[in-house]
Image (tube, coloured by chain):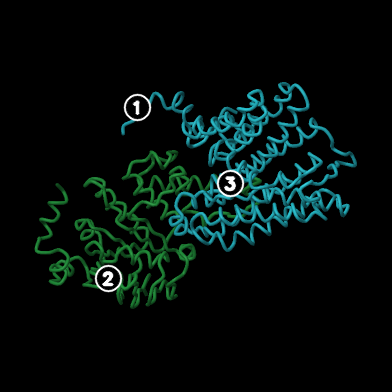
Amino acid sequence: MIAWLANPRTGGLLVLAAIIAVLPLALPNNFYFDVAVRAGLNAIVCVGLNLLIGYAGQISLGHAGFLGLGAYASAVLTAHYGWNPYAAMGVGAIAVGVLAFAVGRPILRLRGHYLAMATLGLGIIISIAANTEDDYTGGPDGMTVPPLTVFGTELYGERIWYWIVGALVVVSVWLALNLVASPVGRALRSVHGSEVAAEVSGVDTARYKVLVFVISAVFASVAGSLGAHYGGFITPVDVGFIKSIELVTMVVLGGMASTYGAVVGAAILTALPQVLTWLQDYEHLAFGLILMLVMIFMPRGLIPSLGSAFRHLFIDRPETQST
Amino acid sequence: MTALAVEALSKEFGGVHAVADLSFAVTPGTIHSIIGPNGAGKTTLFNLITGLYRPTAGRIVLDGENVAGLAPYKLAAKGLSRTFQNLQIFFNMTALENVLVGMHLRLDRRLAPAVLRLAGARRREAQARDEAAELLRFVGLGDYVTADSASMPYGALKRLEIARALALRPRLLLLDEPAAGLNINETAEIDELIRKIGETGVTVVLVEHDMRLVMGISDHILVLDNGRKLGEGNAEQVRADPKVIAAYLGAAALGRNDAAKGG
């Protein structure tokens, strides 16, 4: 039991589930539930994005585009064509996976940060399409999205969505942790560690980079679909370039190559603007300052830095470093 | 029967012949050393054999098949493994995980059982970890099984690379200066380790500057200079070869070379 708790995978997952279960006691009204749901949806995207950025060392500046494709696939297919929302979500996710493969396959054969440039362009194209294809998307004004239904019941309200998204966050974290600790996950991390050594160890680095890119895009697509149904309304701004940057910032702030860090980063960056509203005109200034200070004093991100500080204080202390 | 045959191999970098019209063969189950002054083309040769460079001309024959220009991961699947002169450790992983990456081709690489952590995947993972820990002990890193590779000393990292390369269960192992930067005791331990690896039946190709190590351990020695073969044979023959003495060892006697190394 103790070993089970001390293991970062099982123990951390239990702590995460407990926090999600207890958090509603501290949320005074629906506004806070709404923030929590949005934080959860961002967390799902970031858990996937962290597999790409944190573990495989590849940067995407267009993940809001994948999120947007999922969101608009759900919105357009259910609103205009009367599709079942789950079918729409599935088709959206498959389409995003295929697109990510088509973009990633030629680019990820190259070493270096070409993916960042390609995804930047892709994200912008998707955002332009959302703005201009107003017959389908409603253009810049956005469009309404029908609610998700479970056994014929429409899902409305922040509280019910809190539990759905909360459960999905736990599931995403579990899947990501399993992946990271598997031969596939180690292959991804080896690409980040040393691409040359990975290749001579038998890792087809191009293939694994494409694989993780597709996985992270599908995470974003599913979260986008869910967010569209939850909010009931989407606009191109929700899926634009700024959103892509926000997602990357969440991953970096929480801590690269830390699945829990991705969740914490998403939660903090979603909640922080709400917490800082009392600063009024200085809100953005304070927001930027907090980000800068964290990155200056904890360059590895919150969770890895705090984790090693914790270990240093409580676990490694009796040992004296010989070097 | 040869484990590896290099035939008329050349590699040019913008007019510079790093390897020029080089041919040699490696007998299975032997320790085959490649020596030569700095810039002789030893590491280039390794990079050609392991697919990191594409040859300008010539053939690299592995078990009867020309593998020149094949991607490194495909060569790994054919039982070719190597270490690096300048360490290529996965510093974002533990020592054990580094070895597990070396076992990549022998592990279950399907996505679904991994992300769902099915019972079979858990069992195979536990077995793989046991085997990786066993390999770490084999190379003398029993104390570092749970260590983060980033916190390990240099000498241990050299062995970690060997453990990772062995994890592939190679038929042909290329070691690029395994003793570089090591003190005399550590070098003796590496000497011991390479002998142990040779005894398991793995064919070893060794690039090394430490002459005492090379002369003592090698079944066959190939001497390179300016990308060309200067001479080859066993330790006695190479020592006695006037061309080798003139171009590589210089006027200094081997004994004095060794004394300098030890001091």
Kindly identify which residue carries mark 1.
A320
Coordinates of residue A317 in the picture (x, y in percent): 41, 24
- Residue A50 sits in quarter: top right
In the picture shown, does residue A45 fall above or below B35?
above
Query: Which residue is located at x 41 percent, y 60 percent?
Result: B81
Circle 2 SS class? loop
Coordinates of residue A215 in the picture (x, y in percent): 64, 51
What subunit carries mark 3?
A: A
Circle 1 SS class? loop
Coordinates of residue A272 in the picture (x, y in percent): 63, 29
- Residue B144 sits in quarter: top left
Total labels drawn: 3
Q: Amino acid at mark 1?
A: Thr
Name the N-terminal-most of marks 3 and 1: 3
What subunit carries mark 1?
A: A
Classify residue B147 as left or right of residue A277. left
| Quadrant position of the C terminus of chain A in the picture | top left
In the picture shown, does residue A277 fall above or below A90?
above
Kindly identify which residue carries mark 2.
B227
Q: Amino acid at mark 3?
A: Leu
Indicate which label's residue lies in the foreground, 1 or 2: 2
Q: Which mark is residue A51?
A: 3
Determine the residue located farthest toward the front in the rendered image: A281
| Quadrant position of the N terminus of chain A in the picture | top right
What is the CA distance from the residue labelled 3 to the residue labelled 2?
43 Å
Q: Nearer the viewer, residue A99 or B140?
A: A99
Circle 3 SS class? helix
* Chain corresponding to cyan in the figure: A
- Are there few (<14), some (14-19), or many (20+) residues within 10 Å of tag 3? many
* Chain corresponding to green in the figure: B
